[in-house]
Amino acid sequence: MQNLLKILLRYSNFLVFIALEVAAFMLIGFNNPYPRSSMLSTANSFIAWQHEQVSEINGYFSLRNQNELLAAENAELLNRICSMDSAKNREDVHYENAKVVQMTTGEMHNYLTINRGSNDGIQRGQGVQNSEGVVGIIRTVGPNYSVVLPVINTHTNLSCRFAKNDYIGTLKWDGKDIRFAQLTDVAAHMVVNAGDTIVTSGLSPVFPEGVPVGIVENSVLKEGDSYHTIRVRLCTNFKRLKYVNVVRNKHQQEIEELSNGLD
């Protein structure tokens, strides 16, 4: 205690000077409008910045919740459309929304994992799409998660047709650019133009007819070729894929069992 008193006595003049400076600064600030407004403005700016940061954080989590809500509403809307669309037998199709929790895009055999499994009625062979178009086909199913083979997997083949005239072709990926795939089995007599729309054929229970697949980027037909070489720009942007809908056709198992019985 004695040491503390000695230190205070030793630096008493300096401490008094600091106290007077602080008092003078406060008097200037509160009696002079301009410095006072500057002080308040600085404080308000700092508080506003804090609120902005908190607002951005809250907005991020709110946006995530909104995206999940929109994905569920999109699936519900598709189900309502299907229940009214008996002309194309879509009333037998139900959509289950899901979130992509894992995905690869830089491999020959890309895959993605969704947070829906057998507990949600998901089965191997069901189609997967999103608001843009076709995504892929369910390959393996666990109780709570499923693995999807996307169209950007060299093992995936998809039956498609031209929207303009219903001509059939098969979509395959060459393992190069995830933005494009190749449409094969289109005979030379078929007129193919850039900009032609390609959709699902509906010839299997995996996807209903007319789901967007892509747009013809270009077509090459060399002399003597029997088939076009067609490059299709895919509708689905796999770099931004987050939410999907699983296509559940209640007659799919029966149709596939009958087809397998012919082998």
Image (tube, helix red, strand yellow):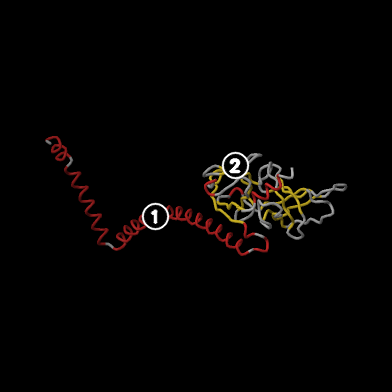
Vertical position of residue 83 compared to residue 252: above or below: below
**What is the x, y in percent for residue 211?**
66, 56
Numbered circle sitting on residue 49? 1
Q: Which residue is mark 2?
A: 140
Neighbourhood count class around disc 2 (C-alpha, 10 Å): few under 14, some 14–19, many 20 upward: some
**What is the x, y in percent for residue 187?**
82, 51
Cβ–Cβ below 8 Å for labels 1 and 2? no
Sequence-earlier tag: 1 or 2 = 1
Q: Hey, which quadrant is residue 42 in on the image?
A: bottom left
Residue 58 left/right relative to 78: left
Callout 1 amino acid: Trp
Callout 2 amino acid: Thr
Q: Residue furthest top?
A: 3
Q: Residue at x 64, y 53 (%)?
A: 251
Q: Residue at x 63, y 52 (%)?
A: 236
Q: Residue at x 64, y 54 (%)?
A: 133
